[in-house]
Image (cartoon, rainbow, N blue to C red):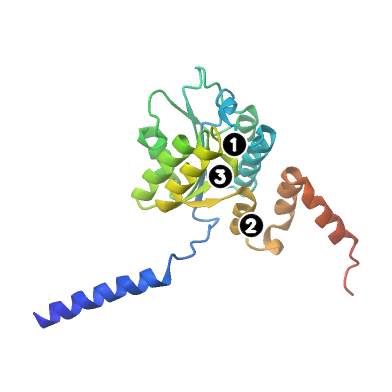
């Protein structure tokens, strides 16, 4: 009885110690990440009011470029693409011509769609980066569902949009409280690549296409004379 009691006390102390240390830093890994693009449809873009639409589109395409250039598995879904939601952004279709778009005809939560769920499982990846329209439903619902199944989930919040800033904040709060990590495409790129020496050209290409302000940094770098 004493042995059992000691084990129970040790278990409680271990849990308390883990809680005291706080959450761990689960870095995105190229070998363990899949990117899920959810309902980036032409019609649904009219609902994105929490950020400038041109900036939003650029962020979506930046995330898609990361996916393509780093050869990361992608799962793409659209809700009733033949209906008022409209087809996917044509740029996404052009970027991933060989990827099957999983059309949903009823499931609000993409995670409830058997084909989508199976496609995610098939990637074999346990770190999921999600983005979509709208943030509070099409991103939050599958993100929280995936957390429940043991995945590490990261919401690309600048490639996700919704009705207004109040709705966005509520969605961010709900996801973060549920264990979803909120990120934007720029740190996603750097956390996946980690080292300029290994992925410099790809990183530079993506950044210059989608973050023109960074051109000043690159110009300065190119003007520095090489070391002897």
- Residue 135 spot, x, y in % from top left: 50, 38
Determine whether the residue tagged by mark 1 lies in a helix, strand or loop.
loop
Q: Which mark is residue 50?
A: 1
The answer to which quarter of the image holds residue 4 is bottom left
Res. 75 visible in picture: no
Q: Look at the picture and state if 36 lies above or below 32.
A: above
Determine whether the residue tagged by mark 3 lies in a helix, strand or loop.
helix
Q: Which residue is mark 3?
A: 157
Res. 60 visible in picture: yes
- Residue 190 spot, x, y in % from top left: 64, 57
Residue at the far bottom: name it: 2
Q: Look at the picture and state if 195 lies above or below 94.
A: below
Nearest to the observer: residue 121 or residue 222: 222
The residues tagged by marks 3 and 1 sit, at their Cα atoms, a distance apart of 11 Å
The residues tagged by marks 2 and 3 sit, at their Cα atoms, a distance apart of 16 Å
Local crowd at mark 1 within 10 Å, few (<14), some, or many (≥20)? some
Q: Which residue is mark 2?
A: 190
For the N terminus, the image quarter is bottom left
In the image: residue 92, left or right of residue 168: right
The residues tagged by marks 2 and 1 sit, at their Cα atoms, a distance apart of 25 Å
Which marked residue is nearer to the observer: mark 3 or mark 1? 1
- Residue 18 spot, x, y in % from top left: 36, 71
């Amino acid at each position: 009885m004493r042995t059992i009691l000691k084990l129970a006390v040790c278990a409680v102390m271990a849990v308390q110690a883990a809680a005291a240390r706080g959450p761990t830093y689960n870095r995105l890994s190229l070998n363990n990440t899949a990117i899920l693009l959810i309902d980036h449809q032409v019609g649904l873009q009219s609902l994105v009011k929490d950020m400038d639409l041109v900036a939003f589109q650029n962020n979506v395409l930046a995330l898609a470029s990361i996916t393509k250039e780093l050869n990361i598995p992608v799962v793409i879904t659209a809700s009733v693409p033949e209906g008022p939601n409209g087809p996917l952004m044509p740029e996404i279709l052009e970027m991933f011509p060989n990827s099957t778009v999983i059309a949903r005809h009823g499931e609000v939560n993409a995670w409830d769609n058997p084909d989508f769920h199976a496609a995610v499982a098939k990637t074999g990846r346990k770190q999921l980066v999600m983005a979509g329209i709208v943030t509070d439903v099409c991103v939050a619902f599958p993100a929280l569902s995936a957390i429940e199944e043991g995945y590490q989930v990261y919401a690309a919040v600048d490639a996700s949009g919704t009705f207004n800033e109040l709705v966005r904040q509520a969605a961010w709060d709900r996801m973060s409280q549920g264990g979803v990590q909120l990120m934007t495409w720029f740190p996603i790129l750097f956390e996946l690549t980690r080292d300029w020496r290994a992925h410099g050209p790809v990183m530079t290409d993506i950044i210059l296409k989608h973050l023109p302000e960074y051109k000043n940094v690159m110009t300065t770098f190119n003007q520095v004379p090489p070391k002897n």
